[in-house]
Amino acid sequence: MKGFALYRLPDSYETVRIEGEVERIKNLEEIKEQQGYLVAPFDIDRHEILLIKPDVMMRQPVIPAPAANSFKEYPIVYETMYEPAFRMFHEAVENGPFHKLVLSRCCQVCIGMQDPERMFNSACNRYPHQMVTLFSTCESGTWLTITPEILLTSSPDGICSTMALAGTMPADCGFEWSEKNRLEQKVVSDYINIAISPFASDSRITGPYSATAGGIQHLRTDFLFALKRGITIGNI
């Protein structure tokens, strides 16, 4: 049972390819000093944690690639799907226990016979400042992801960092951040601060400030902290 992962770090001119056996992990604390590409779901009770072992690891420059071929898009029907869901979310925030909910827009696309690795190279060229990843296993399927959000970084001396990225508007629009966007940023920042507090010491918080990703900008708050003795990334 093998898998592979291709990734390009933000602002890097190099891609990394990992190929190897796929190991099932029951608990994130098991990762400890293991190496490889980790595929971790939000709901560990329903989906497996997978680790693609680096039996083969290659580095190469980003390959220049034209934009991916045009594709046919099948958007959701706003009136019958998105609008009722939006009303339900809005009511839950207005009258329920939630402070922030995010409703994703979905659409189906037909990409024909395009090579996934060609699409990966195209994404690397189009989004030089984002994390771009292509991974594939029998258990997870094949995923191409692009994100400006860094979940967690760790240096050899045990210093970690993460970020709250919330609040959105078009880049270079010239508007000031609204109170709604600032509140959304605060909700996420407060949550992260609470979530890392059992594991962190000497925390420093910077922000919020504007950060551009592609054609949009977000409000961003940075968290820098040291791990308490005996704590590993898997614990966090």
Image (cartoon, rainbow, N blue to C red):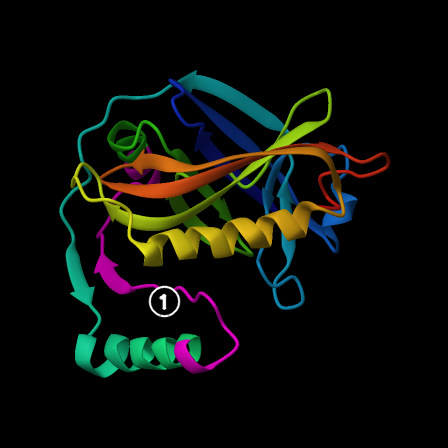
Towards the viewer: 74 or 94: 94
Secondary structure at numbered mark 1: loop
**Does 5 sit above or below residue 41?**
above
Q: Which residue bears the numbered disc 1?
A: 103
Q: Quadrant of residue 228?
A: top right
Place of residue 124 in the rendered image (x, y in percent of width and height, measured from the top left): 32, 30
Given the image, on which type of amino acid does mark 1 rest?
A: Leu
Residue drawn at point x = 54 percent, y = 31 percent: 18
**Residue 31 percent across, percent down from the top left:** 74, 41
- The reply, left or right, for residue 22 in relation to residue 79 is right
Q: Is residue 89 magenta?
A: no
Q: Position of residue 129 (x, y in %)?
A: 34, 28
Q: Quadrant of residue 100?
A: bottom left
63 vs 178, nearest the viewer: 178
Q: Is residue 219 left or right of residue 232?
A: left
Badge 1 crowding class, 10 Å Cα cut-off, few under 14, some 14 to 19, many 20 or more, is few
| As drawn, 103 above or below 209 | below
Residue 172 place in picture, x, y as percent = 18, 36
Give the magenta-colored segment's residue range. Answer: 94-120
Based on the displayed image, in which of its 4 quarters is residue 68 positioned? top left
Residue 167 shows in this picture: yes
Q: Residue at x 37, y 17 (%)?
A: 13
